[in-house]
Amino acid sequence: MSSFDIGIDLGTANTIITIGGKGIVINEPSVVAYDKKKHRVLAVGSDAYKMIGRTPEYIVAVKPLRDGVISDHETTEAMVAAFIKKVSGSMMLKPRIILCVPSSITDVENRAVIEAALSAGARKVYIIKEPIAALIGAGVDISKAAGTMVVDIGGGTTDIAVTSFNGIVQDISLKIAGNTFDEAIIKYISYKYKVLIGEKTAEQAKMQISNVYDPDENKKMVVKGRNLIKGLPEAIEISEKDTYEALKDLVEEISLGIKNVLERTPPELVGDILNSGIIMTGGGALLKGFDKYIHDAIGAPCRVADNPLECVARGVEAAFGLSEELLDGFEKISLYRYK
């Protein structure tokens, strides 16, 4: 990867950028703050994230990606351009950019991602599927003729895939992931305690006291929100049991997605997975007990990759060095050329 090669994991929750020889240089929320009166972008990334729920009506802090794909083209282009400018500075030569996308992305969505990168100043744009990037970033040799299964749980989508010999054999992309977990926690707390909490509070609860395998009622934390009946501020105490009840149905759906992929996978490769196990990547893999839950539900070993949050980004960075192999023997990575 040269100094003019930039890898972008354009995620629903976070955008991670790598640059040649330097590794990860940006890891910030995928958020844009926009001034509707002056029609201009005020901030992106961490600075914009701080504004969520704290701005006047004419300033909006928006997440331009939803379920792993672009939902707001203009703000996505502004965010990507700002991040690229931040890492490339005053470089005269336009960079090559490799972008990571969900495995189920459509041609229209693919085009939107490519155009966003080109508008932001890319010379050439490469696309790589998330399951492949996740496995490469986890240190798995995907060139062998052996079955490997990855469950990549990001902010907007969960990508489940079985790979062998540089290719995806079977896969599925579920619109259940980190953001869905947050929404489920908000909904459950509202229903049980009649207190409405915010996105950030739900995310903190997910990270601090989530347990989807053997929840402990004695492990608790205090959350603050608005009482839905009185309309007044209120602080309540919630436990691991609460987050378990909020998340259990979603966790089961991901488990069913894994079973769906395995049912369509050739038996020889399923046998390989029974030996090598299932690899979990992405922020959702950090939910306490999730790997144990999958092990019990599927019957195959399951492990969380080292540093799961950065697996996809590191795989994107490494993909430039493997591009000849992937392009020659693997259809899921495509090179788009524009004159």
Image (cartoon, grey):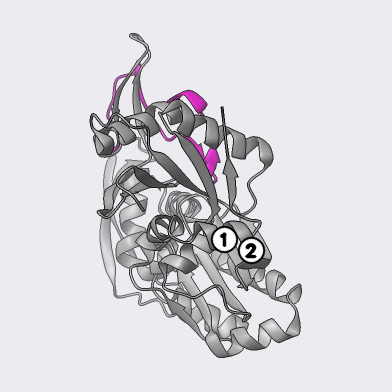
Q: Residue at x 62, y 71 (%)?
A: 163
**Mark 1: secondary structure:** helix
What is the C-alpha distance between the residues marked 2 and 1? Answer: 5 Å
Say which amino acid is labelled 2: Gly
| Closer-to-camera residue (81/302) | 81
The location of residue 108, given as percent across then percent down, is 66, 35
In this rendering, the answer to whether 3 lies above or below 210 is: above
Residue 131 in view here: no
The location of residue 38, given as percent across then percent down, is 33, 9
Q: Residue at x 40, y 72 (%)?
A: 211
The location of residue 129, given as percent across then percent down, is 56, 55
Please identify the quarter of the rendering in which residue 41 is found: top left
Highlighted range, magenta:
49-75
Of the 4 image quadrants, the one containing the C terminus is top right
Q: Which residue is mark 2?
A: 329
Magenta segment: does it hold 51? yes
Q: Alpha-carbon neighbours of circle 1 within 10 Å: few (<14), some, or many (≥20)?
A: many
Q: Alpha-carbon neighbours of circle 2 within 10 Å: few (<14), some, or many (≥20)?
A: some
| Closer-to-camera residue (275/184) | 275
User: Pointers 2 and 1 in contact (CB under 8 A)?
Assistant: yes
